Image (cartoon, rainbow, N blue to C red):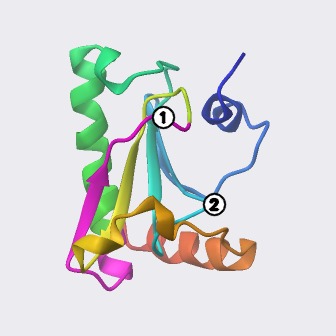
Amino acid sequence: MASIFTRILHGDIPCHKLAEDDRYLAFLDIRPIAAGHTLVIPKQETDYLFDLDDALLGGLLVFARPVSRALAAVIPCKRVGVIVAGLEVPHAHVHLVPFSELNQLNFAHARPADEATLAALTKKIRAAF
């Protein structure tokens, strides 16, 4: 069965897309732990991040770099953190999370986001590329 991320890639589930190329997609998390919380995924469905081949694994962070810069330009923060958890969805991915204090990088802070807020934030972040 296709993961929820594969269903997003196929257009079965909508997302707030920030960036995309032929190998990767970045979109806002609908249950962010902070404003701008973004998921970056390879289009190839692979359960575990470290099972990706070297080129796809390395390319994931290269693809994420301009996304993190756009996030930092829009969201007041000290850094954009990278979290690799990988238990909740069986599709390799990284979380980009703007933060200023280490305790902000905690999934216990996740809350559903308002659709209008996500849409407005998407527009601002995309303009920052």
Mark 2: secondary structure: loop
Asked if residue 119 lies left or right of residue 106, the reply is right
* Amino acid under disc 1: Leu
Q: Is residue 74 magenta?
A: yes
Mark 1: secondary structure: loop
Position of residue 67 relative to residue 86, above or below, is: below
Query: Which residue is depicted at the point 27% across and 66% down?
Result: 80
Q: Are marks 2 and 1 in contact (CB under 8 Å)?
A: no
Task: Name the residue nearer the viewer: 89 or 56.
Answer: 89
Query: Which residue is depicted at the point 35% across and 26% down?
Result: 49
The magenta-colored residue range is 71-88
Query: Which residue is depicted at the point 62% across and 58% down?
Result: 16
Disc 1 target residue: 87
Disc 2 target residue: 30
Measuring from the top left, give residue 34's x and y in whole percent.
Answer: 45, 73
Residue sticking out furthest to the right = 12
> Nearer the N terminus, badge 2 or badge 1?
2
Position of residue 13 relative to residue 32, above or below, is: above
Single out the mark in the foreground, 2 or 1: 1
Measuring from the top left, give residue 47's x and y in whole percent.
Answer: 47, 20
Position of residue 91 relative to residue 64, above or below, is: above
> Is residue 33 visible in the rendered structure shown here?
yes
